[in-house]
Amino acid sequence: MALKLWASSAANALKLSSRAAAPFPASSISRCFSSVIDGFRYSDSHEWVKHQGDVATIGITDHAQGHLGEVVFVELPESGTSVTKGSGFGAVESVKATSDVNSPVSGEVIEVNSKLTGTPGLINTSTYEDGWMIKVKPSDPSELQSLMDSKEYSKFCEEEDAH
């Protein structure tokens, strides 16, 4: 009880409240506090895609890295490798588990984030920027339309976490 009272007092002093307006636009953060980015697409296996021109940049979502914990190793394919939508292209190892990473689109890997070899924790600290994993030239860009937008993905995560 004393801890709850202290937490409530501290939150009041810091002007924090679960009812307070979020410091970010509602569309850039979900209620489960995993961030999502408008304009990105998301798979149900928790990969994100940033599509620009004829390049799709792919990584794991903030939601996924949050559940994994501290990432300590990343396995990535080589440039020139073909990836298939829904199939694994690499793995992420954390202090909790090792998880396969699936490609949300089919195509050819044109670039691999070599920074992750020496600093795999970028997936935790810069999920949507420096923590990207591969860049793919999609063979069928229409596959992107089957992925979730930010609102759909936020709702998906909330429902998944509720179970």
Image (cartoon, helix red, strand yellow):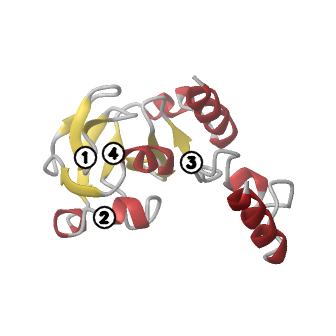
The numbered disc on residue 92 is 1
Say whether disc 4 or disc 2 marks the residue closer to the N-terminus.
Answer: 2
Q: Nearer the viewer, mark 2 or mark 3?
A: 2
Q: Is residue 114 above or below residue 60?
A: below
Residue type of the residue flagged with mark 2: Gly
45 sits left or right of 80 in the view = right
Q: How many marks?
A: 4
Q: Which numbered disc, 4 or 1, marks the residue that appears first in the sequence? A: 1
Marks 4 and 2, how far apart in space? 26 Å
Label 2, residues with CA under 10 Å away: few <14, some 14-19, many ≥20? many
Which of the image's four quarters has the C terminus? top right
Q: Earlier in the sequence, mark 1 or mark 2?
A: 1
Q: Earlier in the sequence, mark 2 or mark 3?
A: 3
Q: CA distance from mark 1 to mark 2?
A: 10 Å
How many C-alpha atoms fall within 10 Å of the one at disc 4: few (<14), some, or many (≥20)? many
Q: Position of residue 154 (x, y in %)?
A: 64, 39
Q: Secondary structure at mark 4?
A: strand
User: Where does residue 97 sit, x and y in percent of width and height?
Assistant: 25, 41
Callout 3 crowding tier (Cα within 10 Å): few <14, some 14–19, many ≥20: many
Would you say 157 lies left or right of 138 here?
A: right
Nearer the observer: mark 3 or 4; the answer is 3
Q: Is residue 59 left or right of residue 33?
A: left
Q: Which mark is residue 121?
A: 2
Left or right of 26 on screen, residue 121? left
Q: Which mark is residue 137?
A: 4
Q: What residue do we see at 69% from left, 39% from top?
A: 151
Residue at mark 3: 40
Q: CA distance from mark 1 to mark 3?
A: 21 Å
